[in-house]
């Protein structure tokens, strides 16, 4: 009876100990549990210690049951220690500690518009060649936009520019103000306040009364260039623009000059680069010609020079005008100029 009782007590202690162990959740509680059941005066230890008071046959059964229970509880204790330790480490990393090796959360920051990037890069190339940078008004007088550039009223050359006139009438009933159609009026403004030698580039917005399509916007940028000094020749124009093309489009680029007409230059040219997509073989980008036109240029017309207050016998100069949208489209393979100004972040964020 006594032994049966002892075995039953041992089983009961074991059951209780295992149940307690399962609900223990800290190392401190584990230590307390160990003292309570397996310690020197613990529940199980006391029973084992008193075995000798039992009858011999009961002693045996209780001894076996007690030692088995002790082994089992020690084993369970050890594995519970591991579990509790593990979970306390993982809860630390998720809640209590800072992992200083983790990369920071990206902070959404703005960027420069791709056309701004082009303007800066182009101006940077020219400043490295000794040019300075200037800017001017987007609402301009007829005088600067046309007259000073050898395009008098009723001259057919005005048809080259589709103009947005400003609703302002002078005493004679004329509309003398407009949204500038090109950056060339700045040539005259610069020459009003400077004497040669002059080397300047002028980035800025221009406007034309255009129906928009993939290659035309009613507003766009230009970068104007002007160099005036004694002894400037067409070779200087070619050398400067060739250097620009190589720096912007790549060392291996070749350039081509062809006659073109602008009333304020003589001779006037357009400059093309050999197609960087097909290396001049002919493809969609260059419309199978192998060449891509990137700017208009020429030697400043003697009449225009005289208007600037420079004696054309003493001074010469060259001027050029390029479209930053066009060269950006070429460089990145952008097929529609309207992408630049519709503010779709999916487009803009690519640059
Ligand atoms: N202003 C001209 C245009 O808008 C470009 C140009 C500038 C041509 C300077 C020659 C010299 O088409």
Image (cartoon, rainbow, N blue to C red):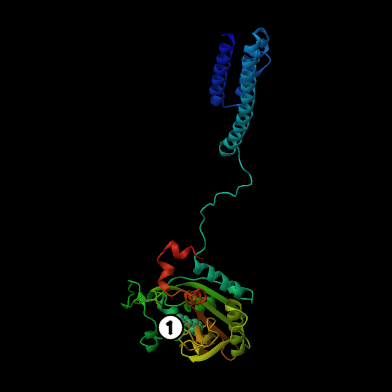
Horizontal side, residue 311 vs residue 219: left or right: right
Horizontal side, residue 51 vs residue 301: left or right: right
Q: Is residue 344 above or below residue 36?
A: below
* Spot occupied by residue 254 in the image (x, y as percentages of width and height): 58, 86
Quarter of the image for residue 26 reads: top right
Which residue is more in the foreground, 244 or 222? 244
Answer whether residue 326 is visible to the viewer in this image.
yes
Which residue is more in the foreground, 270 or 162? 270
* Spot occupied by residue 276 in the image (x, y as percentages of width and height): 55, 81
Q: Secondary structure at mark 1?
A: helix
Horizontal side, residue 175 vs residue 242: left or right: left
In the orientation shown, which residue stands out farthest toward the left? Answer: 173
Horizontal side, residue 41 vs residue 17: left or right: right
* Spot occupied by residue 130 in the image (x, y as percentages of width and height): 64, 76
Q: Is residue 131 above or below residue 95?
A: below
* Spot occupied by residue 52 in the image (x, y as percentages of width and height): 68, 10
Q: Is mark 1 within 8 Å of ligand 1?
A: no
| Residue at the spot of label 1 | 147
Answer whether residue 44 is visible to the viewer in this image.
no
Which residue is more in the foreground, 349 or 232? 349
In the orientation shown, which residue stands out farthest toward the front? Answer: 57
Quarter of the image for residue 91 reads: top right
**Image quadrant occupied by the N terminus:** top right
Which residue is more in the foreground, 43 or 155? 43
- What is the count of numbered marks? 1
Q: Residue at x 65, y 20 (%)?
A: 67
Mark 1 closeness class: few <14, some 14–19, many ≥20 residues within 10 Å:
some
């Amino acid at each position: 009876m006594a032994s049966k009782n002892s075995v039953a007590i041992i089983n009961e202690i074991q059951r209780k100990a295992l149940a307690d162990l399962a609900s223990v959740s800290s190392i401190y509680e584990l230590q307390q549990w160990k003292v309570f059941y397996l310690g020197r005066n613990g529940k199980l230890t006391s029973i084992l210690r008193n075995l000798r008071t039992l009858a011999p046959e009961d002693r045996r059964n209780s001894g076996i049951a007690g030692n088995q229970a002790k082994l089992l509880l020690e084993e369970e204790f050890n594995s519970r220690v591991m579990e509790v330790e593990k979970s306390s480490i993982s809860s630390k990393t998720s809640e209590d500690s800072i992992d200083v090796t983790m990369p920071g959360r990206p902070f959404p920051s703005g960027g420069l518009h791709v056309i701004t990037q082009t303007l800066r890069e182009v101006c940077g190339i020219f400043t490295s060649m000794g040019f300075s940078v200037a800017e001017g008004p987007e609402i301009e007088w007829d005088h600067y936009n046309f007259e000073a550039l050898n395009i008098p009223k009723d001259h057919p050359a005005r048809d080259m520019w589709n103009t947005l006139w400003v609703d302002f009438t002078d005493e004679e009933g004329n509309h003398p103000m407009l949204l500038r159609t090109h950056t060339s009026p700045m040539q005259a403004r610069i020459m009003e306040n400077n004497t040669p030698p002059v080397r300047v580039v002028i980035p800025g917005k221009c406007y034309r009364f255009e129906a928009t399509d993939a290659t035309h916007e009613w507003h766009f940028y230009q970068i104007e260039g002007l160099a005036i000094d004694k002894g400037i020749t067409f070779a200087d124009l070619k050398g400067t623009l060739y250097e620009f093309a190589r720096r912007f489009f790549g060392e291996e680029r070749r350039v081509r000059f062809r006659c073109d007409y602008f009333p304020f230059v003589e001779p006037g040219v357009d400059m093309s680069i050999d197609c960087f997509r097909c290396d001049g073989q002919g493809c969609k980008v260059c419309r199978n010609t192998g060449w891509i036109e990137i700017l208009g240029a020429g030697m400043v017309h003697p009449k225009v020079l005289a208007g600037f207050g420079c004696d054309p016998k003493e001074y010469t100069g060259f001027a050029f005008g390029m479209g930053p949208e066009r060269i950006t489209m070429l460089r990145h393979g952008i097929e529609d100029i309207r992408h630049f100004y519709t503010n779709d972040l999916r487009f803009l964020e690519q640059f």
